[in-house]
Amino acid sequence: MLRRIAMGLGALLLLAAGALYYLLFTYGDPAVDPAWAVAGSADPPAGAVTARWTGTSTLVFSDGETTLVIDGWFSRPGPIQLLFGEIAPDLDAIERGLAHNELTRAAMVVPVHSHYDHAMDSPEVAKRTGALLVGSEATAQIGRGWGLPEEQIRVVGDGERLRFGAFEVVIHESRHFEFPDPVLRERALGDPEIREPLVPPVPAFDYKVGVPLAVEVRHPRGSLLVQGSAGFVPGGLSDADVDVLFLGTGGLGTQTEQYRETYWRETVDATSPSRIIPIHWDALFGPIEGPFRGSLRAAGFLAAGSETTLEFLREKEAGHPDLRFQTLPRYDPVVLY
């Protein structure tokens, strides 16, 4: 009898361990159409503006003379560490990420907001590349906590314009994606400020959101806008017509149809791009090498939004035949214009 009970308990434990592994260490399908994938440009022509993508909303733009970085996030703390421990920049991962992007010098690194998956590594990227860390006061506090000198930190506000070589950067204050779950929304967005230098390792939620930004980048050859999070300020992008829109789509499928339509109107319709490149659709916990992965199964189990996101984007593609959808490869430069 005791043996049968022990065997039953053992089987239950194995089942629980298997379920836990499935939820926390395997991934769903990406919420993008494989037909949108474009190949890298093996030999970009001189003077072309190129983009490299690491994942999430980490992007590197260059015209061969000047390089700008969005986020610069390469660390990938795992779900157990994130939920129950403390996190800090992974210096080895940052070194690998910079090497894969062939990034040694940059003029600017700007996180689209100050959550860990955007801003945690940005001060180290600025330190290693000589870049100016640009962002909200919360981002500045992350930089100060990492020991970045004050002359390498620039706090910016809505409508501010910065010049780096032939690039002009225009800052638009935005909003973070509104998590439908009220507990998560309060923890991630309820108190947005970081009021003193943030010295890691710290719990993930200590990386407060700060002021989310949409980053417009203008160049004589063309223009682009990075909307890193699927949030919006009504009318906030009305004067930002661009050629290419890097559109944050993470979480869209968990929101209402009305929210998705309003988000599209306030970003895509407002900026009139000819190309959309979805970003922030890949796994936060996935490695920064190899193929992109969709959301962690646990996130998909709780939110179940990836299929809805993809259906929404495909409907928009079908309804806008002049609008090209593309997804970038990892690290390889792609000519934008």
Image (spheres, rainbow, N blue to C red):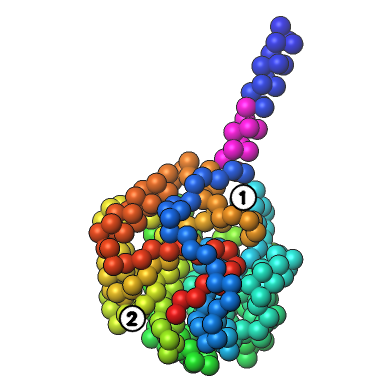
- Judging from the image, what secondary structure is the residue with disc 1 in? helix
Residue type for callout 1: Pro
Task: Quote the CA–CA distance across marks 2 and 1.
Answer: 37 Å
**Which quarter of the rendering shows the C terminus?**
bottom left
Residue placed under numbered mark 2 in the picture: 240
Whether residue 186 sits left or right of residue 283 in the image: it is left
Which label's residue is closer to the chain start, 2 or 1?
A: 1
> Going 25% across and 59% down the picture, which residue do you hit?
319
Q: Where is residue 8 in the image (x, y as percent from the top left)?
A: 66, 16
- Judging from the image, what secondary structure is the residue with disc 2 in? loop
Which of the 4 image quarters holds residue 271?
A: bottom left
Q: Residues within 10 Å of mark 1 (few under 14, many from 20)?
A: some
Work out whether residue 91 can be spotted.
yes
Q: Where is residue 117 in the image (x, y as percent from the top left)?
A: 56, 64
**Magenta region includes residue 204:** no
Residue 79 numbered tag: 1
Give the magenta part as a residue range.
15-24
